Amino acid sequence: MNRVVLRRREAVVEAHDLADGGAPAGVARFAAEELPAFVGDREAAVPVRWVWDDTTRWYPALLAAGVRIERCTDLRLAHAILRRSPFADQALLAADETAAWDELQPVPVAEPALFPPTDPADRLDPVAEHARQQAALAASPRRQGLELLLAAESSGALVAAEMTHTGMPWRADVHEQLLTELLGPRPVAGGRPAGLEWLLRQIREAFAAPGLNPDSPAELLRTLQHAGLPVGDTRSWTLEQVDHPGIPPLLEYKKLSRLLTANGWSWLDSWVRQGRFRATFLPGGVVTGRWASNGGGALSVPTQIRPAAVADEGWCLVVADVAQLEPRVLAGMSADTAMAEAARAKDLYQGMVDAGVVPGRAEAKVGILGAMYGGTRGESGRMMPRLARRYPRAIGLVEEAARAGERGEVVHTLLGRGSPLPTGAWAQREAELGEPAESAGPRDERDRARRAWGRFTRNFVVQGTGAEWALCWLADLRNRLWRLGGTGPLHQRPHLAFFLHDEVVVHAPADLAGAVVEEVRAAAGTAGRLLFGTFPVDFPLDVAVVRSWADAG
DNA sequence: TGTCTGCGCGCC
DNA sequence: AAAGGGCGCGCAGACA
């Protein structure tokens, strides 16, 4: 594989060819405007892995110029993983500029101007950083896993940029119609829409509070308590438990008010343009390796507005999600054959029932969720002993992760992403309280903080490995879709339009729907083999070919 | 006027 | 139905 490290020096780009061993083998220099042509030509000629400081600084402009690349190494993301991995020798990563790499932030997707005027990334040496990372990988006892993780993370960065570039097809007219039906016409000066005003009158009357603003939790709580309702907060779930004529309109108000503020007209104004919702995704934005998003609330698009996600004319959406990803990942990473056997069923929870482990599906679900999240109370606590008996390796893995976290140790995912050291409450308590506390009070607090950190590390190993499976799925699917679709640019071929932890939405020409479904399934198979080799754990998908996202599932 | 925190709620 | 883990966001209210 040819490796080319790209580096910007003012208005000039340097392309450093690396020989097989990683030694510099030649440098080309050209004006920044020539970059898309350079990359496009090389990409068409030979397989290349482009190495650059940060995908968000290079790829949007290439995409805007119509250039799609096959693979890259994102040094910023790789650096973040290696710096925290228990399997990377930190001495090999050390350099004067290490702290600057630590602090390097992705750039927000603005208009794809080719490079901002001043950028801290310009002072970094990507050739040297790449060499340090390669040295750390070469010396790692988990080299294979880390190399796969870095490749998958870098592919994720490409996917994220491409999804922002192409966008999710979004019908503003459908969305507006939905808002108007539920809330009334758009209010002129940001006031409350008629639907909310109508509910507000009923709420104020029912609680005899003519000036009440239900958007203020404190004011609302005082009003409810004054009316004699036994509530300690104003969450919907709490309010549903009490009986009062003001509660139904209040619950309705809260639901519609949420729609208005989170995904109302101003959301449309901000995030939907020319028939596309351009979400911004941040690969590696969560410590576990999950993606974050910073604008448009991409990872929490409510089902309520999904009818507005409609494929273009003659196109379709292929929506696929993995059933019970995390329990399956747990079975695989712990090599728990009994749990993998239950996972052979399309419904893992039903598989547990059929194996006689638990009486019913509901118990299976709360039991497994409790094992992965650290639930100890109620139903899930009661299920734990039998789960531990029947699935000793799986339960043992999460229990050990929890104990390690309680001791303040680092845990890691299957491929080697490390957890952060304890922060916040844990560290604070330890520091404040010092050695064994004299009184019961502080000790309780310390234990509580330790257990909370144990719940975090317990979940980290599963959530993080689940994110690794999803990255491998995405990476393989991305290339399969590209090969499927002729010779045009990205937006004219089947392409990934959305990604939500364990769900993808592909926008594809309708006549390719069947082929896309096959590729989505094949990519899931690839991901399973990459992570778990021949260990027999399945990742069945629910796949739907639909016009609108709302019609899936 | 701007910045910060807590609350509540959407998603997985 | 949530619980137990991870997020982002908008508002209200407090404080500078």
Image: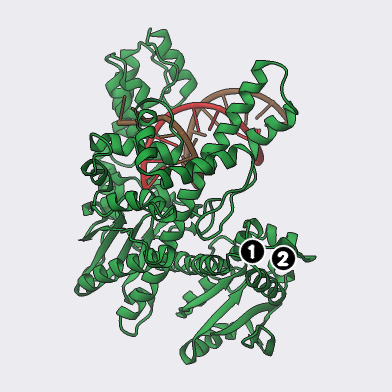
Chain colours: A green, B red, C brown
Residue A478: image quadrant is bottom left
Going 72% across and 75% down the picture, which residue do you hit?
Answer: A128
- Residue picked out by circle 2: A93
Picture coordinates of residue A503 (x, y %)? 34, 56
A374 above or below A67?
A: above
- Residue picked out by circle 1: A79
Question: Along the horizontal axis of the image, is A321 left or right of A376?
Answer: left
Going 62% across and 60% down the picture, which residue do you hit?
Answer: A87
Picture coordinates of residue A52 (x, y %)? 61, 74
A245 above or below A35?
A: above
Question: Along the horizontal axis of the image, is A326 left or right of A303?
Answer: right
Neighbor class of circle 2 (other Cα within 10 Å; few <14, some 14-19, many 20+) is: many
Chain identifier of the residue bearing label 2 in the image: A
Q: Element type at marker 1?
A: helix
Disc 2 to disc 1, C-alpha distance:
9 Å
Residue located farthest toward the right when viewing the structure as drawn: A96
Q: Element type at marker 2?
A: helix
Chain identifier of the residue bearing label 1 in the image: A
Going 69% across and 67% down the picture, which residue do you hit?
Answer: A121
Picture coordinates of residue A193 (x, y %)? 33, 35
Which is more toward the observer, A546 or A178?
A546
Assess whether mark 1 and mark 2 are in contact (beta carbons under 8 angstroms): yes
